[in-house]
């Protein structure tokens, strides 16, 4: 019996194993800077920066940060949307042997505080629009170095901000001033090895306390090579001079970091940077480009795009070469619609702990609608019994996905207990339940954890529970993921008021909005006299979810009749 029967489904040019070069992540930039120095690396609202210019900016920024005293192994928070400053900061920090801590600009002060405390962050690279949160953070936790930029600094015609115009605190540095003040273009002499940590990628824990997955340079290189070689059957037909990628997936998320930014470097592709998603702006942007070689995104955005009234006049079907969906399940009807249009499409699965990759449908070969596909090269995968997690389950039976290979994280930052719970004998226990069909293709059936994926964002209900419990009028509360036609899933809160108290749905939602990033805030609140509980008094989230599903089925049936 072939140990990896899925290899027979690989496209003709996908290797079954890859010889990974001993590269550090920042060295990827050397590939396009050498081969296509004058090609645009970045396109930000029409302002372009070539690969050669990007290389020089990275060298100068690295030397400027080095002069500020940043040492190998220090944790540097990058708290930026998709803009030129992100790749400049990212590759500069890595070239010093420091570790990038990816921070979502939507995080609240509380969330930022937890990340800063967990990682012992010594430097924060941030931007003008989130300064109120950063100021509040720095009052509670001293961050030795803060570097600030304005999002518009790299857009032609906007002018460049200054420390004075941004009213920066004393001792804080200005991004562009740091760059201008450094003329040293020598490469960093810090020795960076493949096994050194490159990134700390936060992911929600089963406890609701975020855990930082430590991804090494070797992990990031392996992921970049795997996704690049997986897609070459279609991507390689577009010459490198014309290659581009739609950079709308956030770089601070592992999916965008690997499949957009690092992929673009290895494939000499121009990144069309989009700092925020607005469907009408997106449609306007697409009108400016004859073709988009690669468009990795999430189901919500695909749905908005292909069903937009202007999709036909934009000739989207001819414009998009390869559309990739991840970050959550995509409806079957939507996949069929994309394929009817004649667009190459692939859906995959991965986690922060597996450097964003795990499995995917082949680009040219056998695709199964609704399937997360087959494992990437060098990624071993098993489905094991849900209780013990030791025995492989028979074909067609649900089992927990466990994975092993060069994608698997080093562990959780300073959290040996959680690491031991997730990684056993080198196998990453994902907590996701799937079945395997007769061709070896995988279909996700459930989540062992209660994670909710809304609009591509991972939401951990326990974290919302914690906030609800802080409300002075609430006796009990629980957050549950419920079906949502637009976001895939959304959060609904079930609450029980303390005796004699009165509250409104709007009041509860407003309370959550002050303590949680916008995408985590419950969209609906249901007041109850009591919540279903187990014999030991644990609130049963699954009972509420089942009730909600039954209501939805009834509504669908009534619509149908």
Image (cartoon, rainbow, N blue to C red):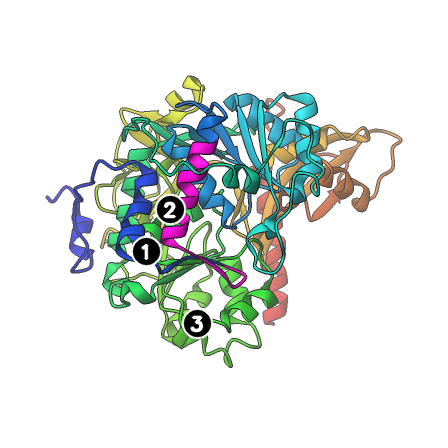
In the image: residue 211, left or right of residue 405: right
Main secondary structure of the magenta stretch? helix
Q: Residues within 10 Å of mark 2 (few under 14, many from 20)?
A: many
Please report whichever mark, 2 or 1, sits nearer to the chain's N-terminal start: 1
Lateral position of residue 474 relative to residue 325, left or right: right
In the picture, measured across the screen, residue 495 lies left or right of residue 482, that is: right
Considering depth in this image, is 217 or 144 the residue closer to the camera? 144
Q: Which mark is residue 511?
A: none
The N terminus, quarter of image: top left
Q: Is residue 289 magenta?
A: no
Residue occupying the point 87% across, 33% down: 501
Say which of marks 1 and 3 sits in front: 1
Residue 55 image label: 2
Secondary structure category for the residue under label 3 = helix
Disc sitting over residue 37 in the figure: 1
Q: Residues within 10 Å of mark 3 (few under 14, many from 20)?
A: some
Answer with left or right where residue 64 lies relative to residue 163: left
The reply to whether the C-beta atoms of the residues labelled 3 and 2 are less than 8 Å apart is no
| Front one among 525 and 422 | 422
Can residue 476 be seen here? The reply is yes
Residue 7 percent across, percent down from the top left: 17, 51
Between disc 1 and disc 3, whose residue precedes?
1
- Which residues, given as a range, are shown in magenta? 44-64
Residue 513's place in the image compared with 552, above or below, is: above
Residue 499 location, x and y as percent?
85, 29
Q: Which residue is mark 3?
A: 337
Cβ–Cβ under 8 Å for marks 2 and 1 = yes
Residue 364 appearing in the image: no
């Amino acid at each position: 019996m072939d140990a990896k029967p899925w290899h027979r489904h690989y496209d003709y040019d996908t290797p079954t194993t890859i010889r990974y070069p001993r590269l550090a992540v920042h060295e990827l930039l050397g590939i396009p800077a050498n081969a296509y120095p004058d090609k645009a690396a970045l396109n930000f609202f029409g302002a372009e920066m070539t690969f050669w210019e990007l290389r020089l900016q990275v060298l100068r920024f690295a030397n400027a940060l080095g002069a500020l005293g940043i040492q190998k192994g220090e944790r540097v928070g990058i708290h930026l949307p998709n803009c030129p400053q992100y790749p400049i900061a990212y590759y500069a920090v890595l070239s010093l042997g420091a570790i990038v801590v990816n921070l979502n600009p939507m995080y609240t002060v509380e969330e930022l505080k937890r990340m800063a405390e967990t990682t012992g962050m010594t430097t924060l690279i941030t931007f003008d629009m989130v300064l109120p949160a950063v100021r509040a953070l720095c009052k509670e936790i001293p961050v030795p170095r803060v570097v600030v930029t304005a999002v518009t600094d790299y857009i032609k015609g906007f002018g460049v901000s200054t420390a004075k115009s941004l009213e920066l605190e004393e001792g804080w540095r200005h991004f562009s001033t740091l760059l201008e003040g450094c003329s040293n273009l020598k490469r960093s002499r810090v020795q960076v090895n493949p096994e050194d940590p490159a990134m700390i990628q936060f992911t929600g824990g089963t406890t609701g306390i975020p855990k930082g997955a430590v991804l090494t340079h070797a992990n990031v290189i392996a992921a970049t090579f795997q996704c690049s070689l997986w897609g070459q059957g279609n991507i390689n037909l577009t010459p490198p001079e014309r290659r581009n990628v739609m950079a709308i997936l956030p770089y601070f998320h592992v999916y965008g970091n690997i499949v957009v930014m690092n992929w673009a470097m290895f494939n000499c592709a121009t990144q069309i940077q989009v700092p925020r998603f607005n469907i009408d702006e997106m449609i306007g942007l697409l009108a400016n480009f004859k073709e988009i070689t690669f468009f990795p995104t999430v189901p919500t955005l695909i749905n908005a795009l292909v069903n937009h009234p202007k999709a036909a006049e934009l000739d989207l079907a001819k414009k998009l070469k390869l559309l990739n969906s991840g970050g959550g399940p995509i409806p079957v009807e939507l996949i069929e619609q994309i394929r009817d249009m004649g667009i190459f499409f692939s859906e995959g699965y991965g986690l922060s702990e597996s450097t964003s990759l795990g499995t995917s449908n082949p680009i040219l070969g056998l695709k199964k609608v609704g399937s997360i596909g087959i494992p990437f090269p060098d990624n071993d995968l098993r489905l094991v019994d849900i209780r013990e997690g030791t025995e492989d389950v028979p074909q067609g039976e649900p089992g927990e996905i466990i994975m092993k290979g060069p994608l698997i994280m080093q562990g959780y930052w300073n959290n040996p207990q959680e690491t031991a719970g997730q990684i056993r004998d080198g196998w990453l226990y994902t907590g996701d339940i799937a079945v395997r069909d007769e061709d070896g293709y995988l279909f996700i059936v459930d989540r062992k954890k209660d994670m909710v994926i809304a609009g591509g964002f991972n939401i951990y209900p326990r974290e919302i529970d914690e906030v609800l419990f802080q409300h002075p009028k609430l006796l009990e509360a629980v957050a549950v993921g419920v079906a949502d036609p637009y976001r895939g899933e959304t959060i609904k809160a079930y609450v029980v008021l303390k005796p004699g108290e009165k509250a409104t749905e709007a009041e509860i939602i407003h309370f959550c909005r002050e303590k949680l990033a916008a995408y985590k805030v419950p969209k609906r609140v249901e007041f109850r006299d009591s919540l279903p509980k187990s014999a030991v008094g644990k609130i049963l989230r699954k009972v509420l979810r089942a009730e909600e599903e039954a209501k939805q089925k009834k509504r669908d049936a009534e619509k149908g009749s």
